[in-house]
Image (cartoon, grey):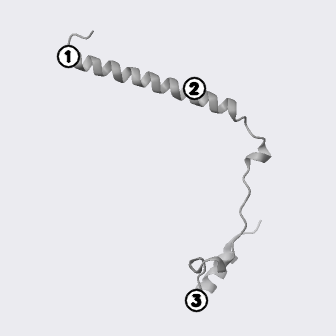
Amino acid sequence: MFPSIPLAQETGLAVLLAAAIVWVTGLGHMLRNSRSRHPEPAPAESLPMIPSQRTSAAHPMESVELTEAEKQAFAGLVRTIPLH
């Protein structure tokens, strides 16, 4: 017992310590069980399928009309990209 703190604080500290120990123990069991139930997948299985490309007609907010100046600026930008 600590002589400098009241009994209520000691009790609270003991309850908090017990809750932390229970939480850490439960977390360890949960992690151990999740590893044993779900073995590591093979490398080919771990890659999700890539969704198909949606067309611009899928939603009106996914399509933007560019002005002629924007089209020229984009074309100039594309020409500056080095192709290796």
Viewport quadrant of the N terminus: top left
Circle 1 residues within 10 Å: few <14, some 14–19, many ≥20:
few
Q: How packed is label 3: few (under 14 Cα within 10 Å), some, or many (20 or more)? A: few
Q: Earlier in the sequence, mark 3 or mark 1?
A: 1
x and y, in percent, of residue 39 in the image: 72, 34
Q: Secondary structure at mark 2?
A: helix
Residue kind at label 2, given as amino acid type = His
Secondary structure category for the residue under label 3: loop
Residue 41 x/y as whole percent: 75, 40
- Rendered image: mark on residue 41: none
Going from N to C along the chain, the mark reached first, 2 or 3, is: 2
x%, y% of residue 70? 58, 85
Q: Tag on residue 6? A: 1
Which-is-in-front pick, marks 3 and 1?
Answer: 1
- Name the residue furthest bottom: 68
In-image side of 37 versus 14 (left or right): right
Q: Amino acid at mark 3?
A: Thr
Which of the 4 image quarters holds residue 72? Answer: bottom right
Q: Read off the residue under disc 3.
A: 67
Foreground label between 2 and 3: 2
Residue 29 is marked as 2
Question: Residue at the location (51% across, 23% down)?
Answer: 25
Sequence-first tag of 1 and 2: 1
Instruction: Check disc 1 and give the amino acid type.
Output: Pro
